[in-house]
C-alpha cells in the first residue's frame, strides 16, 4: 500500500493518514477562524474531501499539516466566511461562550478563560495567535502562510496582547493597539 | 525587523524573534526609557498560556465523529455516494450528514484548489440544496417510501406549514421520503419524490424570506423553481427541465 509513497507524489493513503492524525488540530484551527464549533467541523470535513481529491498536488517531503491548514483556510475565506458575512452572520457574538470554564476541559478554570478571551479577539488576531503561539510558527513562517508582511504579524500579536492585557486588568488604561491590526 | 514601530519590536522581543543586534538595541532602550518599559510590561501581561489552553481545547474536538466522517469518504477519494448517507435513515443522522452532503456538493466541483469561488453565485440556501441534489441518482431513491404521514407531521411541526400527504401530492410523482435538515441554523424540510426516474425535491425553509413569486433558475446543473410566502422559502429542484420544475412549483405554490 505504501510502497509507492514518497518518490513521485503523495498517495491518497498518505493524505488520509495525515488527515486522521491532524483532525483535532484542523478543528481547532477552524474554530479559531470561525468561532463556531459546527462550522469548524464542517470545515474539517470539507478540507478532508478536497485534500483527498487533490492528493496529487501535495509534494512529498513538505509539511502535510501546513498543506491541510492552507486548504482549510482557503475554504473558510473563499467560501464559508464570505457567505456567512453576506447572510449577516459574519460577526462573532463576544458574549457567546465557546468553551466551558472547566467542566469539559479538565485542566483548570483558567484554561477556559484564556480560550474565551482569545475568542473575543478579531478573527485575524485569533488566527495569528493560534498560528504563532499555539502551532508554533515563526513570524516569518506565519507571514508566508498568511501572505502578509511580517509587520502585520507583529502588529496583530501586539494588538492581541494589548487587548488581553486589558481584560486582565481593565483599570490600567494604557493605549490599546487593538484596531490597528488588519 | 521590517516593521519599525516600537510596539511591534517589543512583541518580537517577547516572542524571542529579534536578531541579536536588534534585541540588544531594544534592551538598551528599555533600560533607559520608562515609558517603553511600561508598554513592554503591558504587552507581556497580555501573553497568556495560549499553548496550554489550546492544547486542552483539542480534547473538545468531536474526534470520533470527524474520524467517522473521514472514513466514510470512499477510498477512491470521491465522496461517499448519497445513497450511503441516506440509508442511515434516522433524522438525526440526516442532519449531521447534511453538513457532509452540503460540503460534498460544494467542494467536489471547483477546479482550482485555492481559486476563489464565483462567490456571488453561492450565497443562498438554494445553492446548498442544489449542491447535494446534484449528487442524487435513481439509486439514491432505491427502497420503499417511509411512513409518509408521520414524517410529514414532524416536518409540519418544525416548520409551521401544513404538510400532509394531500398537500404535498404531485401528479405523476411518487413520494419517497420526508426529512428534516438545517441550513445555517434554520430548519429545512425536504420532501423527496421520483418523477419517472428523476429525483425531485420539494424543500421548505423556515426563515424570514421576503415574499416572492415562483422563479426558475439553474444551479449546479439542477433546475430550481423557488418562491417565498408567509416567512417561508420554498423550492422544487431536480435534474429536470426548468419548465418542469416551474410547473411543479406552481402546483405547490397554489397550496403554500
Image (cartoon, coloured by chain):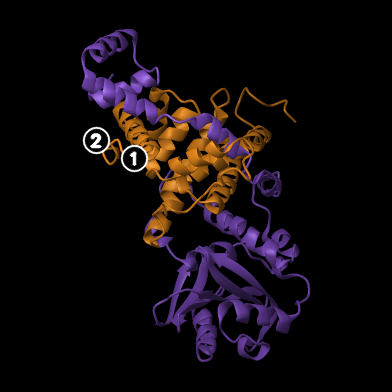
Chain colours: A orange, B purple
Pinpoint residue A56: horizontal percent, then vertical percent.
57, 35
Q: Name the residue under label 1.
A: A170
- Above/below status of A88 relative to B107: below
Q: Mark 2 points at which residue?
A: A175
- Above/below status of A172 relative to B155: above
- Above/below status of B97 relative to A49: below
Q: How crowded is mark 2: few (under 14 residues within 10 Å), some or many (20 or more)?
A: few
Marks 1,2: beta carbons within 8 A: no
Instruction: Between label 1 and label 2, give the one nearer the viewer.
Output: 1
Pinpoint residue B145: horizontal percent, then vertical percent.
75, 77
Pinpoint residue A103: horizontal percent, then vertical percent.
63, 45
- As helix, strand or loop, the secondary structure at mark 1 comes to loop
Q: Residue A101 versus residue B126: which sits nearer the camera? A: A101
Q: Residue at x 22, y 23 (%)?
A: B35
For this orientation, the residue located farthest to the front is: A171
Which quarter of the rendered picture does the C terminus of chain A lie within?
top left
Q: In the image, B10: left or right of B86? A: left
Q: Residue A105 versus residue B70: which sits nearer the camera? A: A105
- As helix, strand or loop, the secondary structure at mark 2 comes to loop
Which quarter of the rendered picture does the N terminus of chain A lie within?
top right
Q: Please tell me which of labels 1 and 2 falls first in the chain.
A: 1
Pinpoint residue B65: horizontal percent, then vertical percent.
68, 49
Q: Mark 2 lies on which chain?
A: A
- Above/below status of B39 relative to B122: above
Amino acid at each position: 500500500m505504501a510502497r509507492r509513497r514518497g518518490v513521485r507524489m503523495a498517495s491518497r493513503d498518505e493524505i488520509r493518514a495525515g488527515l486522521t492524525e491532524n483532525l483535532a488540530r484542523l478543528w481547532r484551527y477552524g474554530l479559531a477562524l470561525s468561532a463556531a464549533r459546527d462550522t469548524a467541523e464542517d470545515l474539517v470535513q470539507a478540507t478532508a474531501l478536497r485534500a483527498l481529491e487533490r492528493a496529487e498536488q501535495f509534494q512529498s517531503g513538505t509539511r502535510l499539516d501546513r498543506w491541510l491548514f492552507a486548504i482549510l483556510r482557503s475554504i473558510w475565506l473563499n467560501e464559508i466566511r464570505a457567505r456567512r458575512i453576506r447572510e449577516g452572520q459574519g460577526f462573532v457574538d463576544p458574549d457567546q461562550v465557546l468553551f466551558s470554564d472547566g467542566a469539559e476541559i479538565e485542566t483548570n478554570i483558567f484554561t477556559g478563560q484564556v480560550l474565551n478571551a482569545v475568542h473575543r479577539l478579531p478573527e485575524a488576531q485569533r488566527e495569528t495567535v493560534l498560528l504563532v503561539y499555539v502551532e508554533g510558527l515563526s513570524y516569518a513562517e506565519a507571514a508566508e502562510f498568511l501572505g502578509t508582511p511580517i509587520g502585520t504579524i507583529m502588529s496583530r500579536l501586539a494588538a492581541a496582547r494589548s487587548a488581553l492585557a486589558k481584560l486582565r486588568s481593565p483599570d490600567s488604561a494604557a493605549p490599546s493597539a487593538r484596531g490597528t491590526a488588519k | 525587523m521590517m516593521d519599525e514601530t516600537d510596539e511591534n519590536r517589543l512583541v518580537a522581543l517577547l516572542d524571542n524573534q529579534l536578531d541579536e543586534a536588534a534585541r540588544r538595541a531594544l534592551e538598551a532602550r528599555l533600560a533607559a526609557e520608562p515609558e517603553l518599559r511600561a508598554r513592554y510590561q503591558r504587552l507581556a501581561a497580555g501573553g497568556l498560556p495560549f499553548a496550554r489552553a489550546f492544547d486542552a481545547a483539542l480534547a473538545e474536538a468531536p474526534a470520533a465523529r470527524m474520524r467517522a466522517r473521514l472514513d466514510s469518504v470512499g477510498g477512491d477519494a470521491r465522496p461517499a455516494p448519497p445513497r450511503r448517507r441516506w440509508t442511515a435513515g434516522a433524522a438525526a443522522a440526516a442532519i449531521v450528514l447534511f453538513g457532509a452532503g452540503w460540503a460534498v456538493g460544494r467542494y467536489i466541483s471547483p477546479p482550482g484548489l485555492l481559486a476563489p469561488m464565483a462567490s456571488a453565485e453561492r450565497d443562498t440556501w438554494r445553492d446548498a440544496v442544489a449542491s447535494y441534489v446534484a449528487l442524487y441518482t435513481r439509486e439514491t431513491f432505491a427502497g420503499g417510501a417511509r411512513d409518509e404521514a408521520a414524517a410529514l407531521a414532524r416536518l409540519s411541526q418544525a416548520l409551521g406549514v401544513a404538510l400532509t400527504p394531500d398537500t404535498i401530492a404531485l401528479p405523476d410523482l411518487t413520494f419517497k421520503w420526508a426529512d428534516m435538515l438545517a441550513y445555517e441554523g434554520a430548519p429545512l424540510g425536504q420532501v423527496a419524490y421520483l418523477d419517472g426516474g428523476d429525483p425531485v425535491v420539494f424543500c421548505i425553509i423556515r426563515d424570514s424570506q421576503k415574499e416572492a413569486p415562483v422563479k426558475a433558475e439553474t444551479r449546479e446543473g439542477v433546475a430550481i423553481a423557488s418562491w417565498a410566502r408567509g416567512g417561508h422559502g420554498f423550492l422544487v429542484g431536480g435534474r429536470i427541465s426548468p419548465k418542469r420544475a416551474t410547473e411543479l412549483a406552481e402546483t405547490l405554490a397554489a397550496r403554500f
